[in-house]
Image (cartoon, grey):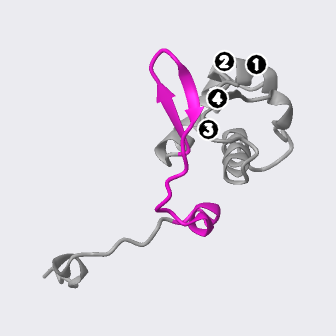
Amino acid sequence: MPDHMRLSLDIMSVDRASEEPMHRQIYGALRRFILDGQIPQNTLLPSTRSLAEDLKVGRNTVIAAYDQLLAEGFIEARAGSGTWVAPIQQNRPMASLRAGLAVPQKLSRRGSTPRCCA
């Protein structure tokens, strides 16, 4: 059995009548699928070109969605290998991930001291 899976494109669609931008729809759908386990870690995502073609959207739309997922650590780009679903970090509670909230960080004494600029 292979150590990775390939994403089936049948689970994706965009609503052109929605007020939500298409790149946000794609981002949101992929993020939900990853968090819900419908797209497990180490799944090879389709190329931006093929996903754009299948969804009948511009490639830049898919790139914007992938860029946001990459920035949030949900996917990772592997040189010469494609874009993959990243392992979910064990130190981030799932409730925070689902809510889209960052895990609160402890500040140093200096960082938590209010400063006033005159």
The residue range painted magenta reads 74-101
Residue drawn at x 69%, y 24% is: 58
Q: CA distance from mark 1 to mark 4?
A: 23 Å
- Judged from this view, the residue extending furthest toward the front is 1
Mark 4 or 2: in front is 4
- Mark closer to the observer (1, 4): 4
Where in the figure is residue 94, as x and y percent of width and height?
60, 64
Residue that numbered label 3 is attached to: 65
**Mark 2 or mark 3: which comes first in sequence?**
2
Query: Which residue, given by chain and number where applicable, does mark 4 sit on?
Result: 4
In this view, 33 is above or below 49: below
Front residue (pair 71, 5): 5
Mark 3 surroundings: few (<14), some (14-19) or many (≥20) residues within 10 A:
many
Circle nearer the N terminus (1, 3): 1
59 displayed left or right of 80: right
Answer whether labels 2 and 1 touch (C-beta < 8 Å). Answer: yes
The disc labelled 3 sits on which kind of residue?
Answer: Ala
Tell me residue 12's x, y (percent). 81, 36
Mark 1 crowd level (few <14, some 14–19, many ≥20, 10 Å Cα) = few
Q: Which mark is residue 53?
A: 1
Q: Can you see residue 85?
A: yes
The label shown at residue 49 is: 2
